[in-house]
Image (tube, rainbow, N blue to C red):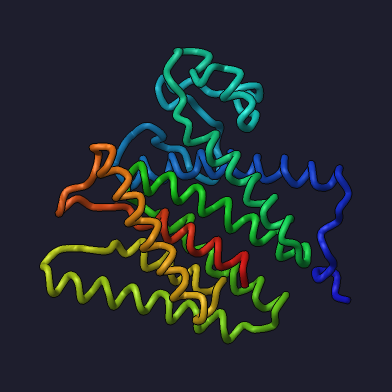
Amino acid sequence: MLPWLQPFPSDPVLVAAGIAGFAALGSFLGAAQARLGAAIDGEGTYAGRSFRGGRSICPSCGTTLVVRDLVPVVSWLALGQRCRHCGAAIPADYAAIEAGSALAFLLALWLGGPWITVVARGILGAVLVALVVVDLRRQLLPDALTLPLLPLGLLEAWLVGGDLPAAVAGIAFGGGLLWLVQVLYRRLRGREGLGIGDVKLMAAGGAWVGPAGVGPVLLIAATATLAAAGIAYLLGRGPGLTTRIAFGPGLALGIFAMALAF
């Protein structure tokens, strides 16, 4: 059996290391989505700092954070969700992405499969959690987070299933279908109804689910988005007829659910 087709080891130490590693990945993704979102919106909070590296800072006071401030989830809880230096509230975004990344790994591990599939699905879930947060906050899906999911899906399909053509077809079908919807809506209504970020995310998701999974992904996405809008409406925070609704979270849910199923 090829090395990458071996099952993920059930050793508790390795599982714990995996959880810690994915929580750390979530910490990186939390910082990345914040920096990317601020840069795209033209904010100067992280001016001069690449999302790929650079020391973490408090976005409120600009103080460089040390290790004890950056332990995934634990630091956020221990500090009372506030900056140690200025007392400003720390958004739950970071802890949510850290915990979500670890949970994505555990779900992939629970469903089993070759270790490379477990790791790849965990990474997919972690990035999707970060995309959900930034889309809900800013209605953005940064290319720097979305597009790497496409080659990762192709690589996993090639190494594990050997069905690279289906993955390529999923990219073309998923991305092409949403692109067509976007173009038709703009021409018929004279305004944007679907962001290009959603098109790119569906194209990347197509690499994971293939053409057969595109329909179920869109069904899950539409159902989840409408359900969220309905709940918000019942709570008195519903959108108006022309209010933009983030579609990325629904797409992320559909893609991850179908990627785990395929």
In this rendering, would 24 be left or right of 87? right
Point out residue 35 in the picture as x, y percentages from the top left corner.
43, 40
Residue found 14% across the figure and 63% down from its top = 191
In this rendering, would 182 be left or right of 221? left
Q: Nearer the viewer, residue 251 or 76?
A: 251
Residue found 30% across the figure and 50% down from its top = 229
Compared with 208, 241 (above or below) is above
> Residue 185 is drawn in which quadrant?
bottom left
Residue at the outermost front position: 234
In this rendering, would 225 be left or right of 243? right
Residue at the outermost bottom position: 165
Question: How many numbered markers are drawn?
Answer: 0
Point out residue 128 in the picture as x, y percentages from the top left corner.
51, 54
Point out residue 223 in the picture as x, y percentages from the top left corner.
38, 61
Point out residue 260 in the picture as x, y percentages from the top left corner.
62, 64
Residue found 72% across the figure and 75% down from its top = 160
Compared with 237, 87 (above or below) is above
Residue found 25% across the figure and 44% down from its top = 233
In this rendering, would 174 be left or right of 243? right
Where is the C terminus found, in terms of image quarters? Answer: bottom right
Where is the N terminus found, in terms of image quarters? Answer: bottom right
